[in-house]
Image: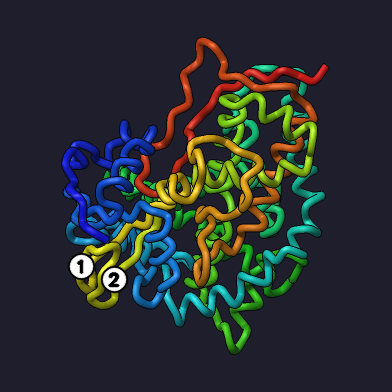
Amino acid sequence: MERLPTDGLDRWNLLDPAVQQCPYGFYRATRAQAPVYRMPQTGFYLVTSFDLCREVIRQPDLFASGVSPMALRDGGVPQAIIDVYQTEGWLPEASCSTSDPPRHTRVRTFLEPLFTVQRVREIAPMIDSVAHELLDAIGDRTGIEFVHEFSHPLPMIVIARLIGVPNADLARFKAWSDAIVEPFSMMVSAERELECARLVVEMQHYFAGLLEDRRTKPRDDLLTAVARAGEDPELHFDMREQLTILTIDLLASGNETTTAAITSGVKLLIENPAVIAEVRADPRLVRNLAEEILRLESPAQGMFRRVTRDTTLGGVPLREGELLSVRFGAANRDEHQFPAPERLDLHRQQPGKHLALGIGRHHCIGAQLARQEIISAVTALLERYDGFALTPGRPGPQYTPSFFGRNLHEMYVTLTPRS
């Protein structure tokens, strides 16, 4: 591929919160001019076309996953953060999604059987029930803050029930979950990052106590499965690994991105009200709607990869050690793959073709759970309400500044009950 001029691209900065509110114009420009684009503000490359993103993901040994966004700043992770973990808790391991074999293989071998299609099918009634319980709590009110009252608690309650966390402790999980995710945004202050580390340590001690309880009093939950994995001679996860799996791979990964997808889904319905009638006319289309939500507003906008040997990508020479940010949010709106890519279309020939949940070695382990949570949420909402609108006089939807994710911080919604 011929390298194209990058005139004008440097006026954009993807680390600018204003650009992150709607990055799609920038993504279009980079796909057209330089789909492998060296970001002048950071020195690493953005990969923005569908074909090139897929090429990177399909070669996990050439483009490795073991990159921590927190370590990309000058000097790496601050010593003060490391000291908090080492003296007060456990220094977290890399998550499954940001690690490579052999550790990635060990963790994935454990996690994958927990979220099979069959297992998710079995728990779907529980997910449906959680959605309806949250709407019951809203009752007759027609104006709500959607994130706080519905889209955040739904996946949080689901994963907490699967893990085996008492309902009385759920109030603390929002702060803990935020503390895990925020440092990966690459947008937090040093003071907030230190605060996040202390909150994560607090959560580590909470889970360490529950793991000890499950070793003597096992139950049918994920806490027990993780505790047993610590005693398995093949897996033999130590406490540090067990806590990483619980806090990052299960709690944070099983919560934040799905919250983002559900919120974005309702925002898309507000912007495309005719879609509601389509789904009501053919409820099977709710599955296609879930895929379009994931495609159009990919909750994980990008993931890092490290070049393991000199190579070329899209005609751009890359040296060993250089970093790529594979931008799912750009690839999933590539006009060469998706006709009218900005349109919410329930009748695409391959509705699941997007890259929002990854492919290959790093395909999202919780993909089926995330899809079911979106489907359960949308189905329950459409059973109760004829339509949705942004509430006049309230702040408009604002995305939390993040280089990694696309999360609406809050969204005030007016609900129109079904007649």
Q: Residue at x 29, y 76 (%)?
A: 308
Given residues 405 and 233, the one toward you in this image is 405
**For this view, does 319 lie left or right of residue 140?**
left
**For this view, does 328 lie left or right of residue 83?**
right
Spatial separation of the CA atoms under disc 2 and disc 1: 11 Å
Q: In this view, does 323 lie above or below 296?
A: below
Q: Mark 1 points at which residue?
A: 317
The x and y percentages for residue 269 are 62, 29
**For this view, does 200 lie left or right of residue 346?**
left
The x and y percentages for residue 368 are 66, 57
Given residues 155 and 311, the one toward you in this image is 311
Q: In this view, does 218 lie above or below 11?
A: below
Q: In which quarter of the image is residue 346?
A: top right
**For this view, does 74 lie left or right of residue 348?**
left
The x and y percentages for residue 79 are 24, 61
Give the quarter of the figure containing the C terminus: top right
Give the quarter of the figure containing the N terminus: bottom left
Q: Mark 2 points at which residue?
A: 307
Q: In this view, does 293 lie above or below 241?
A: above
Q: Which amino acid does label 2 sit on?
A: Val
Circle 1 — which element? Answer: strand
Q: In which quarter of the image is residue 88?
A: bottom left
Task: Assess disc 1: are there few (<14), some (14-19) or many (≥20) residues with their C-alpha within 10 Å of its C-alpha.
Answer: few
Q: What residue type is labelled 1?
A: Pro
The answer to which of marks 2 and 1 sits earlier in the sequence is: 2
Mark 2 or mark 1: which is in front? 1
